[in-house]
Image (tube, rainbow, N blue to C red):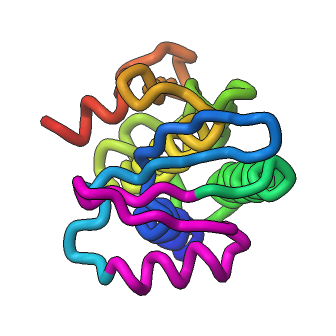
Amino acid sequence: MKKYVSLFMVAMLVSIIAACSQGASNVEITIPASFLEGEDVESAIEEAKAEGIEEVEENEDGSLTYIMSKSTHDELMEEIEASLQESIEEMKTSEDFVSISDVSANSAFSEFTVVVDQEMYENSFDGFAILGLAIGGLYYQLFDGVDPEQYAVTVQLEDEQSGEVFDTITFPDALEE
């Protein structure tokens, strides 16, 4: 459970919604102001620089633009992918999410299939694990250059007994409901 809370917090701190544009040697990621609400902007800037972000610009609309080298961006993407893979493995083996028996994802982390004991799942808090997957997937996509207007994560919940998908959740739409 700690991994998912940590992943969620990292995603919020570094801010999920980002627009990436890749130059010849630099990558720019703009963090919308809406994801900085309640955050100390100076602390966010300090944290970004501590993570290897070369330059952080505060924009007039309250957003922040992170400018980093392509190599720093590549390292960041590798770290995000490794963290997601680790979370997936932990989710499959952890006693915290007893209804979940398997999790798979596509290479873009835009689609996940979670195999569960449906009855146990519906009577537990294991849905929080799904939220962690979705946030991680959105975070990965946005830092990978997906347009914030186009990014999405689809999670299919499959019953382990019948093999049938009993629910499909699409993020970020589900967060707005």
Q: Residue at x 66, y 82 (%)?
A: 50
Q: Is residue 59 magenta?
A: yes
Q: Residue drawn at (53%, 72%), measured in percent from left and top?
A: 6
Indicate the quadrant containing the C terminus: top left, top right, bottom left or bottom right: top left
**Point 48% across, 60% down: residue:** 11
Q: Is residue 57 left or right of residue 60?
A: right
Give the side of residue 155 with respect to residue 54, left or right: left
> Does the image show residue 41?
yes
Residue at 57% across / 25% down in the picture? 111
The answer to which image quadrant residue 66 occupies is bottom right
Look at the image and give the residue range highlighted in magenta.
41-66
Indicate left or right for 20 with 19 as reference: right
In this view, 84 is above or below 23:
below
Name the one closer to the observer, 66 or 162. Answer: 66
Residue 55's spot in the image, x, y percent?
61, 67
Nearest the eye: 65 or 2: 65
Q: Position of residue 102 (x, y in %)?
A: 66, 39
Closer to the camera, 60 or 51?
Answer: 60
Asked if residue 52 is among those painted magenta in the image, a careful observer would answer yes
- Residue 88 pos. (x, y %): 68, 49
Q: Quadrant of residue 22?
A: top right
Residue extending farthest right: 71
Q: Is residue 112 above or below residue 18?
A: above
Q: Is residue 177 above or below residue 150?
A: below
| Residue 91 location (% of width, % of height) | 62, 55
